[in-house]
Image: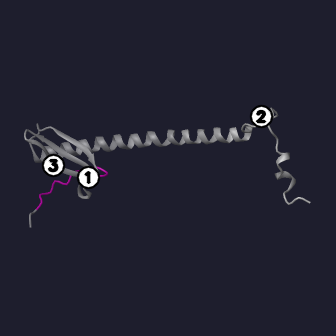
Amino acid sequence: MDDEPRELREADWPDDGDGSDGPSRWERRARVMRIMSIVALFALVVPGALGTWSLAQSTAARSCRLAVDALADARTPSRVAFELGAPETAGWNCYALAPTGEVRVAVLGVIPGAPDLRPRSGS
């Protein structure tokens, strides 16, 4: 008497009928489903990530423009950059483009919002 049930024996599985030693139709179907699942996952995740990045970049640009207008001349050009350098300046940074070089005006954070324009006291 066999330990394996009749349903699990190798000889009872249907095969392709072509007699080749290649992958069976079930293995091919599983491979195709795996590939389609990965493609579908990327199709869902990539547009969302790109949309989130675009929204964060435009919000940072508007906040940077507000900060530069409040702290410098309205005609001073500005630029935003996402940087992961130091922990205290990680995220979106706002720079004013001065004739002598770039000056950091505000750190907007990882999720940009309204800039903090309160004067800092040096104690």
Q: Which residues are magenta?
A: 109-120
Q: Residue furthest right?
A: 1
Q: Nearer the viewer, mark 3 or mark 1?
A: 1
Please name the residue that numbered disc 1 is placed on: 85
Is residue 51 toward the left or the right of residue 77 in the image? right
User: Counting other residues with Cα less than 10 Å from the Cα at mark 1, is it few (<14), some (14-19), or many (20 or more)?
Assistant: few
Is residue 58 toward the left or the right of residue 50 in the image? left
Please name the residue that numbered disc 2 is placed on: 20
User: Counting other residues with Cα less than 10 Å from the Cα at mark 3, is it few (<14), some (14-19), or many (20 or more)?
Assistant: some
Q: Nearer the viewer, residue 112 or 27?
A: 27
Residue 63 in percent (x, y) is at: 23, 46
The secondary element bearing badge 3 is classed as strand
Q: Residue furthest bottom?
A: 123
| CB within 8 Å, label 3 to label 2 | no
**For residue 116: magenta?**
yes
Please name the residue that numbered disc 3 is placed on: 105
Is residue 111 toward the left or the right of residue 123 in the image? right
The secondary element bearing badge 2 is classed as loop
Q: Nearer the viewer, residue 23 or 43?
A: 23
Image quarter in which the C terminus is found:
bottom left
Alpha carbons under labels 2 and 1: distance apart? 57 Å
- The amino acid type found where label 3 is placed reads Val
As displayed, is residue 7 above or below residue 48?
Answer: below
| CB within 8 Å, label 3 to label 1 | no
Q: Nearer the viewer, residue 78 or 15?
A: 15
- The amino acid type found where label 2 is placed reads Ser
In primary-sequence order, the first of circles 2 and 1 is: 2
Using the image, tell me which numbered label, if any, was put on residue 61.
Answer: none
Q: Nearer the viewer, mark 2 or mark 1?
A: 2
